[in-house]
Image (spheres, rainbow, N blue to C red):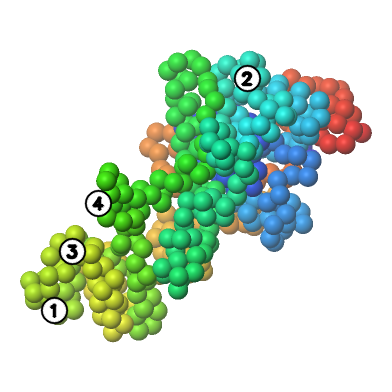
C-alpha cells in the first residue's frame, strides 16, 4: 500500500536520513531512538519482513507488540538485497543518506556487496554503523550473538545466582540488545558530529560483548582493579543475596539506606538512634559494605513491621530514598507518568487504538514532536523509490527484476 505524505520530521536530528537494515531488537532500538529525535529512518526489510512483526498479539497482520515498540517513526520499504535489483536500489539510497545501520556480521555485509569500501566509494560522508556480537579483531569475530548469549558471556547469570539459590539466570529483559542499541545511538550521533567537523564519514563498529563487559566489570572487577589484586571480584552490596525489595505487612517496598545521613535518619525513624554510635558495622561506607548481608537483613526485619504506605510516608519524610515496588500493571498506572503523559493512546491506521510511550527527553529549542505510526511491511516502498528518482515505469521494472522478492 502507498502511504499518505507525512509531515516533515522535527527535532534535533531533522534532516538526517538513516538507511536501517537492522532487525529484531538491538539495531531497531538504536534506529528508533534516531527516528524519535527527528531522523528520517528508512527501514529496509526482506520480503518476509522483520521477524518481530509476527510475535504476540496482532502478529498475524505483521504488527505484533515487540515490533510496534521498536519501529515507530520509521518508513518501511521491502528490498531483496540478495537480488541485483534490490542491491541497486539500496546503493542508490545510500548515495544521499547520512547513516547506514546494520546488525549482521561485517562478513555478511561483504557477501551482500554492501561492505564499507563500496558504500563509502559512492558516499564518503556516510556513517556506516555496525552492531554485532564481538570485535572483529578477536577470535570470536565470526560468532553469532543473541542477548542470552551475551548475558552469559559477560557473567550476568553468574552475578544473579546468589539471589536465586545459587542458580544462574538471565535478566528477564533483553538488556544486552537494548543497552548496546542505546550505546550505538550515542556512537552514531557522535560520528555525525565528527563528520560535521571533518567533512567525512567513517565506519563505526559497536560489538555487544565489549560494550557489555564494562556494565558488569565496572562494579565487579573490584579488588582486581589493582595490580597486584587487593581483594577478590565482586561489589558486595550488589551481589548480596539479601539485596532485594523489602517485604512489608502488605507488599514490598524499595528503600536505600546508603549514606551516613540515611542511616542516622533510618535509625531515628525506627527508634534506635543509639546504634549509630554503638554498632561498629555502621561506622562508614567501608564497614557497611563489609557487613552488607547482615545490614540488609537488619533493615528487612524492621520493614516487616509496617505497611508499604506507612514506610513510604515515614522514610520519605526522613529524606531516605523509598518507592513502592511496581508490577507491570501498576507501572502503567503510575501517577508521575500520568502527570507527564508518558503513556499515550494514538490511532493506528491498521491496529486502531494503541498505547505508546513518550520520547524520554525534553528539549527547549528543538523538541522532537514528529510522529510516524509504526509502518506496515513495505508501506513506503513506492514513496521512497520516487524520492530516490525512480518513476512509475522504473519502479515496475525493478519489481519485475525481483527487487522486492520473487521476480514478477
331 lies left or right of 242: right
Other residues around mark 1 within 10 Å, as few (<14) / some (14–19) / many (≥20): few
User: Along the polypeptide, which appears first: circle 2 or circle 1?
Assistant: 2
Please give the label number shown on residue 117.
2
Q: Nearer the viewer, residue 316 or 46?
A: 46
Instruction: Report which residue position mark 1 lands on.
Output: 272
Task: Indicate which disc, 1 or 3, sits on the residue closer to the N terminus.
Answer: 1
Q: Secondary structure at mark 1?
A: loop
Q: Earlier in the sequence, mark 2 or mark 4?
A: 2
Q: Nearer the viewer, mark 2 or mark 3?
A: 3
Alpha carbon separation for disc pair 4 and 1: 35 Å
Against 198, is 206 above or below? below
Q: Secondary structure at mark 3?
A: helix
- Label at residue 287: 3
- Residue ID for mark 4: 230
Tell me which label, 2 or 3, sits earlier in the chain.
2
Query: Is the C-beta separation of discs 2 and 3 under 8 Å?
Result: no
Of the image marks 3 and 4, the number of the one nearer the N terminus: 4
Q: Nearer the viewer, mark 4 or mark 1?
A: 4
Q: Which corner quadrant holds the C terminus?
A: top right
From what the image shows, is residue 256 above or below residue 407? below
Q: Quadrant of residue 7?
A: top right
Q: Position of residue 318 (x, y in %)?
A: 19, 68
Image position, residue 243 (x, y; %): 35, 68
In primary-sequence order, the first of circles 4 and 1 is: 4
**For the point 62% across and 42% down, which residue is it?**
143
The image position of residue 182, as x and y in percent, is 48, 43
Amino acid at each position: 500500500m502507498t502511504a499518505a505524505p507525512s509531515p516533515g520530521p522535527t527535532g534535533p536530528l531533522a534532516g538526517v536520513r538513516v538507511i536501517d537494515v537492522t532487525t529484531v531488537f538491538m539495531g531497531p532500538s538504536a534506529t528508533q531512538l534516531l527516528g524519535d529525535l527527528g531522523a528520517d529512518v528508512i527501514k529496509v526489510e526482506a520480503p518476509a519482513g522483520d521477524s518481530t512483526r509476527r510475535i504476540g498479539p496482532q502478529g498475524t497482520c505483521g504488527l505484533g507488540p515487540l515490533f510496534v515498540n521498536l519501529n515507530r517513526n520509521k518508513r518501511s520499504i521491502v528490498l531483496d538485497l540478495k537480488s541485483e535489483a534490490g542491491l541497486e536500489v539500496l546503493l542508490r539510497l545510500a548515495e544521499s543518506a547520512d547513516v547506514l545501520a546494520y546488525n549482521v556480521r561485517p562478513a555478511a555485509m561483504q557477501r551482500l556487496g554492501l561492505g564499507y569500501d563500496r558504500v563509502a566509494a559512492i558516499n564518503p560522508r556516510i556513517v556506516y554503523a555496525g552492531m554485532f556480537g564481538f570485535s572483529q579483531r578477536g577470535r570470536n569475530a565470526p560468532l553469532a550473538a543473541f542477548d542470552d548469549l551475551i548475558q552469559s558471556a559477560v557473567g550476568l547469570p553468574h552475578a544473579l545466582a546468589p539471589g536465586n539459590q545459587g542458580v544462574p539466570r538471565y535478566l528477564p529483559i533483553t538488556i544486552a540488545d537494548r543497552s548496546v542499541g542505546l550505546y550505538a545511538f550515542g556512537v552514531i550521533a557522535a560520528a555525525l558530529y565528527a563528520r560535521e567537523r571533518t567533512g567525512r564519514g567513517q565506519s563505526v563498529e559497536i560489538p555487544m560483548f565489549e560494550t557489555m563487559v564494562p556494565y558488569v566489570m565496572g562494579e565487579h572487577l573490584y579488588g582486581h582493579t589493582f595490580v597486584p589484586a587487593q581483594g577478590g571480584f565482586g561489589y558486595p552490596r550488589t551481589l548480596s543475596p539479601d539485596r532485594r525489595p523489602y517485604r512489608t505487612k502488605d507488599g514490598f517496598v524499595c528503600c536505600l539506606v546508603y549514606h551516613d545521613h540515611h542511616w542516622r535518619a533510618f535509625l531515628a525513624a525506627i527508634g534506635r538512634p543509639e546504634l549509630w554510635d554503638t554498632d561498629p558495622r555502621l561506622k562508614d561506607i567501608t564497614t557497611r559494605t563489609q557487613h552488607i548481608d547482615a545490614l540488609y537483613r537488619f533493615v528487612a526485619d524492621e520493614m516487616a513491621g509496617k505497611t508499604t504506605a506507612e514506610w513510604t510516608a515515614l522514610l520519605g519524610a526522613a529524606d531516605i530514598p523509598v518507592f513502592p515496588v511496581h508490577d507491570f500493571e501498576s507501572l502503567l498506572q503510575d501517577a508521575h507518568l500520568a502527570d507527564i503523559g508518558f503513556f499515550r493512546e494514538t490511532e493506528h491506521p491498521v491496529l486502531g487504538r494503541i498505547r505508546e510511550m513518550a520520547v524520554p527527553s525534553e528539549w527547549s529549542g528543538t523538541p522532537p514532536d514528529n510522529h510516524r505510526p509504526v509502518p506496515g511491511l513495505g508501506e513506503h516502498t513506492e514513496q521512497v523509490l520516487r524520492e530516490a528518482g525512480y518513476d512509475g515505469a522504473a519502479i515496475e521494472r525493478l519489481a519485475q527484476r525481483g527487487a522486492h522478492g520473487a521476480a514478477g
